[in-house]
Image (cartoon, grey):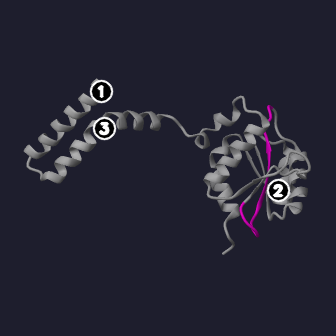
Amino acid sequence: MPTVWKVYVVVALAAGIAVHVAGLDLRWSAAAAALVPALPAFLVGMLRGARTPAAREDPVVAKQAMTGTEFEDHVARIARSSGESVIMTATTGDYGVDLVVGRRPNRLAIQCKRQSRPVGSSAVQEVVAGAAMHDCAHTMVVTNHDFTPAARRLAERHGCVLVGGEGLVRLGSTIRRLTAPDR
């Protein structure tokens, strides 16, 4: 028997006996014997996990060295984690829509732009025009950067939601709000 397992057995027996001597019944002794040896690994993992933000919680992840396709995958993962179905459109012939999120009649057309400069109005034009081709009621442009003033004006005119930079942290809740069934 490897040394690690011997240590686990000794710790389990000691924990079970200590709980029994403390006056608790046999069930608690067995529970302590089963759980106490795993406690150090659990605590280390919990602390390590608490310090590490998830990809959807860390907007820096989207700004790192992702390609455009990786950024689309990142946005699709966020949408799926929001509980919505996601259709990734073909690379060509997508009419300016990269992702179709949700179900009819509240489907959302998303155009993803991973760029090193502000996104212009052409992205808004593309997703607004392509939304009808994919039978979508709502439109959104998502970027790792920011938007030009012209893109903001056009998006406001057409009701297109713009999510950029630090707004990526709230992307999941924004998607849930747009794809929620009408009440």
Separation of residues labelled 1 and 3 (CA atoms): 15 Å
The one nearer the camera, 27 or 70, is 27
Indicate the amino acid at tag 1: Val
Q: Position of residue 132 (x, y in %)?
A: 88, 63
The secondary structure type at the circle numbered 1 is: helix
Indicate the amino acid at tag 2: Glu
Which marked residue is nearer to the observer: mark 2 or mark 1?
Answer: 1
The one nearer the camera, 81 or 145, is 81
For the N terminus, the image quarter is top left
Judge whether residue 18 is colored magenta.
no
Mark 2 = which residue? 156
- Left or right of 57 on screen, residue 152: right
For the C terminus, the image quarter is bottom right
- Which segment did they paint magenta? 102-116
Residue shown at 85% from the left, 59% from the top: 131
Say if residue 90 shows up in the picture: yes
Residue shown at 71% from the left, 61% from the top: 102
Residue most extreme to the bottom? 183
Q: Which mark is residue 39?
A: 3
Query: Count of labels shown?
Result: 3
The secondary structure type at the circle numbered 2 is: helix
